[in-house]
Image (cartoon, grey):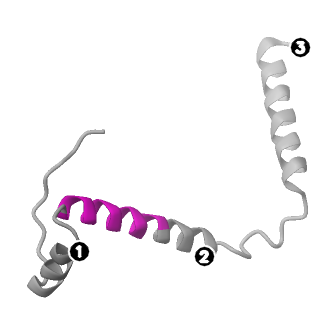
Amino acid sequence: MATIKKTISLPEELYKEAENLSQNFSEIVKESLSEYIKKKKIEKALSTAGDFKDIKETGIEYVDRIRNEDISLEEERIGR
């Protein structure tokens, strides 16, 4: 994985507290940012809860319908 260097600004007290926990500040930032991204992805997924409540077909029915549409389009394309 490629790495990048960025300059960040944060309160000195926060930096010192992190430094007391580990001498590898980059690792702390990497771990913290990974956890933050994971949390935000979960929040985003949960925010869609209920958006699909009005859909009448199951996931399997939806996939079957889309596949059949694809097959029909392909058959049209090749002249069947």
Q: Is residue 20 left or right of residue 40?
A: left
The image shows residue 26 at horizontal and vertical percentages of: 20, 59
Amino acid type at circle 3 is Arg
> Earlier along the polypeptide chain: callout 1 or callout 3?
1
The residue to which callout 2 is attached is 47
Percent from the top left, x then y, of residue 56?
90, 64
Secondary structure found at label 1: helix
Would you say the magenta stretch is mainly helix, strand or loop?
Answer: helix
* Front residue of this view, candidates 48 and 22: 22
Q: Which residue position holds label 3?
A: 80
**Amino acid type of the residue that numbered disc 2 sits on in the rendered structure:** Ser
* Residue 48 to residue 68: above or below: below
The quarter of the image holding the C terminus is top right
Pointer 1 residue: 21
x then y, percent, for residue 61: 90, 49
In front of the other: label 3 or label 2? 2
Secondary structure beneath dot 3 equals: loop
**Residue drawn at x 9%, y 83% as measured from the top left:** 12
Q: Give the Cα distance between marks 3 and 2.
A: 44 Å
Magenta range is: 25-38
Label 2 and label 1: CA atoms lie apart by 34 Å
Q: Secondary structure at mark 2?
A: helix
In the image: residue 20, left or right of residue 36: left
Q: CA distance from mark 1 to mark 3?
A: 68 Å
Along the horizontal axis of the image, is 20 left or right of 80?
left
In the displayed structure, 10 sits above or below 3; it is: below
Residue at horizontal 13%, vertical 52%? 5
Asked if residue 65 lies in the magenta stretch, the reply is: no
Amino acid type shown at disc 1 = Leu
The reply to whether the C-beta atoms of the residues labelled 3 and 2 are less than 8 Å apart is: no
